[in-house]
Image (cartoon, rainbow, N blue to C red):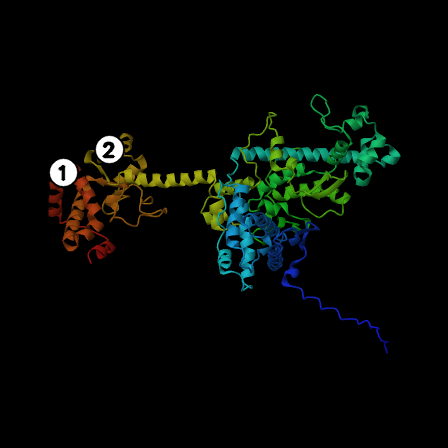
Amino acid sequence: MPRRGERKQRVRSSAPKPLPTRDLEHVGIRTVTWARRGGTASHFVNPAQYQCSILAAQLADEWITYTRSMALSDGGAGLALAVRSFAKFVDKHLPPLGVHPADARLDGHKVDLVEVIHSWEEDLRQYHGLRSNSPYVKTNSLLTLIEQRALKDTSMPEALRVRAQAPPAYPTYQGEPLDEFSNAERIALRDSARDAVRALEARMARGRAMLEHGVDPREGGWHEPANLLWAATRPHLLTVEILKPQFRQNVLSWPEPVKALLPTAPDGTLLRRGFRYLVVELGRLLFPTEVDLQAFRVLLMLGMSETSPEELHFLQLPDIEFTDGGVRLVQRKMRAQRVRADLHPDPEPEEEAQEFAGDGAWDVPGLLRRLLAATELSRTVFPDADPWLFLAVERRRRGVLDAEFADFTNRDRRFGRWIAAQRDAAGKALKISEPYEIRRLRKTTKVVRAVALGGTVSDLAGDDHHVEVYRLHYAHGTTAHILAGRSINRAQKWVFDRMTTPSRPVLVTAEAEQHLEEPAVAEDLGLDAELAKALRTGELDMGLVNCRNPWASPHRNDAKVCHVAPAMCMLCRNAVVFTSQIPRLLLLSDHIEHMRANLTPRHWQALWGRQAAALAEVFEECADLIPAARREIAELGLRLDLPLGMRTEFDR
């Protein structure tokens, strides 16, 4: 019991901690990690870096959700970039307006995010320029995330919800489409690539021949090129740190065999000096580099008309299967999310084919075999490298040789630099039009296919494109326009020839008929000797008039006998009228006039108007023979023998 004046110390219970608010849930870095080329890569958004941390966290959460639900192969890199860009702009844009960035949130009403988004779009357009598509891509990514949030958050302002469903304010830039390489440029690129492949194979053959005589340089000496090549197959032995103690610092004092490995000018001057370049040149004697692989890339693109640069670039060894008939490739088009197999057959062997020293098969299966042979040692020396078809060995940053995927993105290893380094037979630089885009090779192969096959757009599109895609991206090329123009010219010429070529029959007088078989007379009438003889003997009498060639009727496109004789003989350029056939023409004229009384004017004009006009022209030319022909009809009782089908069609 406590004494008087003593106070027992009471232990009061601590006050309960406040429940975490919703805002605290947004603290933390949002990260997305995905597999990339055998390794891992990641993108992140740290809301704590921005004053509008709640808004950044809300958008970052939607980014992660969208990336996972859509299984984006790149980890949603564009979405994360849009979130960071917008959050950074909000921090800069709101304070001058008297608004704190922390008040900005998707489910709040203190900040009008619709106006902020519009200002952000204008800022992006000023920063990236009018010809950039980045403003459209970033805005579209942000609106996609906001629209996804609107589907599950009913507290979002209606104006922001409506804005998320609308497109970006500025559309994509529609620049000039890429044109294909001309035929001369295509041939120049092909020949240069073939020369580069031959040079690569010769260089590697020389290096591998030297490698057979190499031993461990720690035992056989470092001043022998063969021993240095042996060390190149053990990359940990060929570094600048290991080479420095073995050679003098002055390159000119190196042994001549080793100094000869460095690149030199035609006059013998060393172009590159130092241990780094020695390592590079030793690697080039054994392994192909990215620049060397560009030649294979060019030749394969020219030979694979149905393969895009992306599909070719990302081929791996498991995707390649050699068969008895060629090579089967499993190709992946990332943009279309499509995987397809394509068979490239071997060419048919030519009889007595001429063999050239140094040449191999330049078709797709042959090129792939040569490429695999060139990279075989690379895969042996670097077994941990991913099985990419385009596997390049370069001196990496850590100073040793290593095999990695040839991405062709380095400024000195791009397609344009490869073109600039090529020379023609005269030693001059290739004259290739810009831009230097590998996609132009794809369009060039499409154009070659169009020239070779012709046909409709659906035929030319093939199996790797829809008709609309081919029309928008490939049919606009210069060659395609020229071919289309030629087709239009041919069609117009055919129409104009039909309009300008006389369609009425040729009238042969009685005197000319007697001498029709003479070459001079026949030539004046546009006939040859055999045709004139056939006309004289009546072999080509069609019942009304004669015909030059019943199998070349202008009224049908196939090579079959005319099916509209004698109804359309007076409108045919093949018709030949003898004076003895004028009574038949008079009877036909009487029949046509009889039909005038039985048909309406419009109907008669459509059926018989042109025949009546053609008969009138013939009668005008032989007006002096008409009375005699009338008397012959009356005296002999001649009648017109029209086909039954002709009578039943026009007399009903």
Question: Is 40 left or right of 95, judged from the image as shown?
Answer: right
Residue appearing at x 51%, y 54% in the figure: 114
The answer to whether any part of residue 61 appears in the image is yes
Q: CA distance from mark 1 to mark 2?
A: 22 Å
Q: In the rendered structure, find residue 515 and report the number of the disc placed on it.
A: 2
- Residue type at the position of mark 2: His
Corner quadrant of residue 489: top left
- x and y percentages locating residue 571 in the rendered image: 25, 44
Corner quadrant of residue 610: top left
Observer-nearest residue: 187 or 354?
Answer: 187
Quarter of the image where the C terminus is located? bottom left
Q: Is residue 251 above or below residue 645?
A: above
Question: Is 386 left or right of 211, judged from the image as shown?
Answer: left
- Residue type at the position of mark 1: Ala
Residue appearing at x 49%, y 58% in the figure: 159
Question: Is 237 left or right of 437, judged from the image as shown?
Answer: right
Question: Which residue has dot 1 on it?
Answer: 623
